[in-house]
Structure formats: structure tokens, C-alpha cells
Image: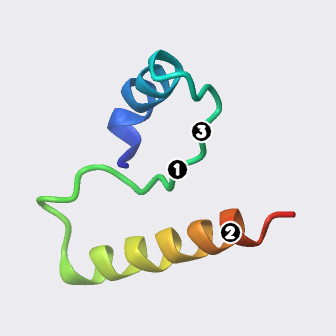
Amino acid sequence: MTTRFVSAAEMMSRVLGLPGYAFVVIDHPVSSATDEELAARARAAIEQGLGMLLKG
């Protein structure tokens, strides 16, 4: 999920009965990001995802 669409994703999770559903968020936009920016966003997404998986 990119930062621009967080509120829409949060609304959808509430509508679908999963309020507070956790998802990874990266900077927006993606389409105009450089390879280096995309690599940094991918690293950030991995770190966030691992944090969610290992949260206990």
C-alpha cells in the first residue's frame, strides 16, 4: 500500500469486518520512483512486514 491510499485501505478493512488490519505502507508514488528509490521502499516494506510477522 502506498501512503496515498492508506485511508482507503483502512476504510475497506473496516467495511470487511477487520478494523485495525495491519498492512505495509510505502511512499507514494511508485510509478515515477527511481530504481534506487524502489529498492529503498522494498527494503522498508520487508522490514515492516517482518515486524508484523514477528510481533508477539
N-terminal label among 1 and 2: 1
| Left or right of 20 on screen, residue 24 | left
Question: Neighbour class for label 3 at 10 Å: few (<14), some, many (≥20)?
Answer: few
| Left or right of 5 on screen, residue 33 | left
| Left or right of 14 on screen, residue 3 | left
Q: Name the element at disc 1.
A: loop
Quick check: marks 1 and 3 in contact, CB under 8 Å?
yes
Q: Marks 1 and 3, Cα distance to the nearest angstrom? A: 7 Å
Label tally: 3
Relative to 56, does residue 22 appear above or below in the rendering?
above
Q: Marks 3 and 2, Cα distance to the nearest angstrom? A: 13 Å
Residue furthest out toward the top:
15
Q: Quadrant of residue 37?
A: bottom left
Q: Amino acid at mark 1?
A: Phe
Disc sitting over residue 23 in the figure: 1
Q: Name the element at disc 3.
A: loop
The colour scheme used to paint the residues is rainbow
Question: Neighbour class for label 2 at 10 Å: few (<14), some, many (≥20)?
Answer: few
Disc sitting over residue 53 in the figure: 2
The foreground one among 17 and 39 is 17
The foreground one among 10 and 25 is 10
Residue occupying the point 60% across, 66% down: 48
Question: Neighbour class for label 1 at 10 Å: few (<14), some, many (≥20)?
Answer: some
Residue occupying the point 19% across, 75% down: 34
Q: Marks 1 and 2, Cα distance to the nearest angstrom? A: 11 Å
Residue 6 screen position, x and y as percent: 43, 34
The foreground one among 56 and 1 is 56
Q: Name the element at disc 2.
A: helix
The foreground one among 6 and 16 is 16
Q: Which residue is mark 3?
A: 21
